[in-house]
């Protein structure tokens, strides 16, 4: 039984989670200024165009910053400590928060290259997570 | 006719014993008690209040979603101006700004701002994330300890870019404790060293337990009116010279630059511009200290030092008693009290310093003070510049 918090998926964010379930990482892209956008929304935050489309991205990124949780974010994460939470700069531009899944949690560092994996945590929900790119 | 000059004429904070309200009281009663004390100090009555501002974490879901309605009901008043703007801990600096605009315009004459929390008595805090909906559906499922993990990621990035160290951050906690030791009302008053901070357990890298604010109950109130009205009142008026606010993100992943407190910078520029002064004119600074890194980022953002210079700036006890930059003179959220949202206590201490009422911790020759609140996960900033002349 999975006891950690699950995303409250809504119509605006549904395409992201549907793609994740199919093991694809997608974000939005502005058809006018071509900027990639995450978190899902209805208008571009750069040029305010409302012509956004969903596109698959490479799943490659670089750790922008991170923390190693020594204390859990509530009881459901107790067995996981220590674990790495990071903000990752995707190659296409947007930032995404996730876990870096690794046996070498103390080796996680800013600038480290990572790539996406897909963790099917329940029948309905798949969480995109990241692993060091060389692994 | 010029704009009406806005002044603060009453402040009060609820006395605590070991971080809790003695005898117990609910979140509304704590606010009502503080309101009465602040109005008494001013020489005003509850019936004079025509503007009411509050923000809180109590009664949600439930009556707390309608915070000013619940509080008006409890107080038995019918304000014609109300403000339940919730920017997190900085809400109260924003409330001062909003109330000031309402008083200046003539819409109201007396504004009451309050806060109350029983989070410690209720043991309602843990590191669990915020509900995983809207932008936080991409955040909470990954187990970032809340809110400390977000601040930790900002610290990690600041250390990477500028060479800031855990010792630099510890200096802030130590200096703040030295102020608390001079404040009989502070919760934590035992001596503290940099080594104590560094050897306290790591919560989430690089932040230690003693880089984090306390978890306490608390309540406070601030009363504002016009300079003209204050002439007939007993309290020495403290002038609201400038205010500003900004907000940038809900999820830490959407923060524009994790090594720079953008909301504080934008808020600070607005407040300084309105006051017509710069950072060098501030005699005492009350800076939101949810975590040591919050302070360091805010000092840089407000222009007290350059970007990346915060570590050097706070070194050698500069912000402590006797230092060149008196800061968080009541002992701050790190050592005085931190009841969930701390912003109102920054204002209360700034006013006491400006009135010369701060006892053993009084800073000499204070003419101008700054109070800066930070809310959420470095999500918002709101700044007030106050003077006694
Ligand atoms: Zn665009």
Image (tube, coloured by chain):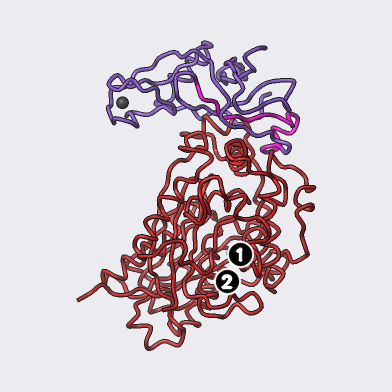
Which one is earlier in the sequence, the residue at label 1 or at label 2?
2
Residue A19 x %, y %: 48, 14
Residue located 74% across and 22% down the image: A104
The magenta span reads: A72-90
Chain on which label 2 sits: B
Q: Colour of chain A?
A: purple
Identify residue for label 2: B13
Spatial distance from mark 1 to mark 2, Cα to Cα? 7 Å
Instruction: Work out whether A84 lies above or below B41.
Output: above
Is A75 part of what is drawn in magenta? yes
Residue located 70% across and 52% down the image: B170
Q: Colour of chain B?
A: red
Residue B280 x %, y %: 47, 63
SS of the residue at dot 1? strand
Residue B206 x %, y %: 68, 40
Chain on which label 1 sits: B
The picture quadrant where one finds residue B112 is bottom left
Labels 1 and 2 touching (C-beta < 8 A): yes
Is B184 part of what is drawn in magenta? no
Instruction: Work out whether A92 lies above or below B315.
Output: above
SS of the residue at dot 2? strand
Instruction: Work out whether B50 lies above or below B332.
Output: below
In the rendered image, the quadrant that contains the C terminus of chain A is top right
In the rendered image, the quadrant that contains the N terminus of chain A is top right
Q: Is residue B320 visible?
A: yes
Find out if the beta carbon at label 1 lies less than 8 Å from the nearest ligand 1 atom: no
The picture quadrant where one finds residue B8 is bottom left
Front one among B62 and B296: B296
Front one among B54 and B382: B382
Identify residue for label 1: B218
């Amino acid at each position: 039984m999975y006891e950690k918090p699950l995303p409250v998926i809504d119509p605006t964010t549904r395409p992201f989670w549907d793609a994740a379930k199919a093991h694809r990482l997608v974000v939005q892209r502005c058809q006018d200024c071509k900027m990639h956008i995450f978190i899902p929304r209805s208008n571009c935050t750069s040029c305010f165009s409302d012509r956004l489309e969903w596109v698959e991205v490479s799943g490659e990124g670089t750790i922008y910053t991170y923390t190693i949780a020594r204390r859990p974010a509530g009881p459901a994460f107790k067995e996981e400590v220590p674990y790495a939470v990071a903000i990752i700069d995707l190659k296409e531009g947007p930032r995404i928060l996730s876990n870096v899944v690794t046996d070498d949690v103390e080796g996680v560092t800013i600038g480290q290259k990572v790539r996406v994996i897909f963790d099917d945590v329940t029948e309905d929900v798949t969480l995109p997570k990241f692993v060091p790119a060389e692994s | 006719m010029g704009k009406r000059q806005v002044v603060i004429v009453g402040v009060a904070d609820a006395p605590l014993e070991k971080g809790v309200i003695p005898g117990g009281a609910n979140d509304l009663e704590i606010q009502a008690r503080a309101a009465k004390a602040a109005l008494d100090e001013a020489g005003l009555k509850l019936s004079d209040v025509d503007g009411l501002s509050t923000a809180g974490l109590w009664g949600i879901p439930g009556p707390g979603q309608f915070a000013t309605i619940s509080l008006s009901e409890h107080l038995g008043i019918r304000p014609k101006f109300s403000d339940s703007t919730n920017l997190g801990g900085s809400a109260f600096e924003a409330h001062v700004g909003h109330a000031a605009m309402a008083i200046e315009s003539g819409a109201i004459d007396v504004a009451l701002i309050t806060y109350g929390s029983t989070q410690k008595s209720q043991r309602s805090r843990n590191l669990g994330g915020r509900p995983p909906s809207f932008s936080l559906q991409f955040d909470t499922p990954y187990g970032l300890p809340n809110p400390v993990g977000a601040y930790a990621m900002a610290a990690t990035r600041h250390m990477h870019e500028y060479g800031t160290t855990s010792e630099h951050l510890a200096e802030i906690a130590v200096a703040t404790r030295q102020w608390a030791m001079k404040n009989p009302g502070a919760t934590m008053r035992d001596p503290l060293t940099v080594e104590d901070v560094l050897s306290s357990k790591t919560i989430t890298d690089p932040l230690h337990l003693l880089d984090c604010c306390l978890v306490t109950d608390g309540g406070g109130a601030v009363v504002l009116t016009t300079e003209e009205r204050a002439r007939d009142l007993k309290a020495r008026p403290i002038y609201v010279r400038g205010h500003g606010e900004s907000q940038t993100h809900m999820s830490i992943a959407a923060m524009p630059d994790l090594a720079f407190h953008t909301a504080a910078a934008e808020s600070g520029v607005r407040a300084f511009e309105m006051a017509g002064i710069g950072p060098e004119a501030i005699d005492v600074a009350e800076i939101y200290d949810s975590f040591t890194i919050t302070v360091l980022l805010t000092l840089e953002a407000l222009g007290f030092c350059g970007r990346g210079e915060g570590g050097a700036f706070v070194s050698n006890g500069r912000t402590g008693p006797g230092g060149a930059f008196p800061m968080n003179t009541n002992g701050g959220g790190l050592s005085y009290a931190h009841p969930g949202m701390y912003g109102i206590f920054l204002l209360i201490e700034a006013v006491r310093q400006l009135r010369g009422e701060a006892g053993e911790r009084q800073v000499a020759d204070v003419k101008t003070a700054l109070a800066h609140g930070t809310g959420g996960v470095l999500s918002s900033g709101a700044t007030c510049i106050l003077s006694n002349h």
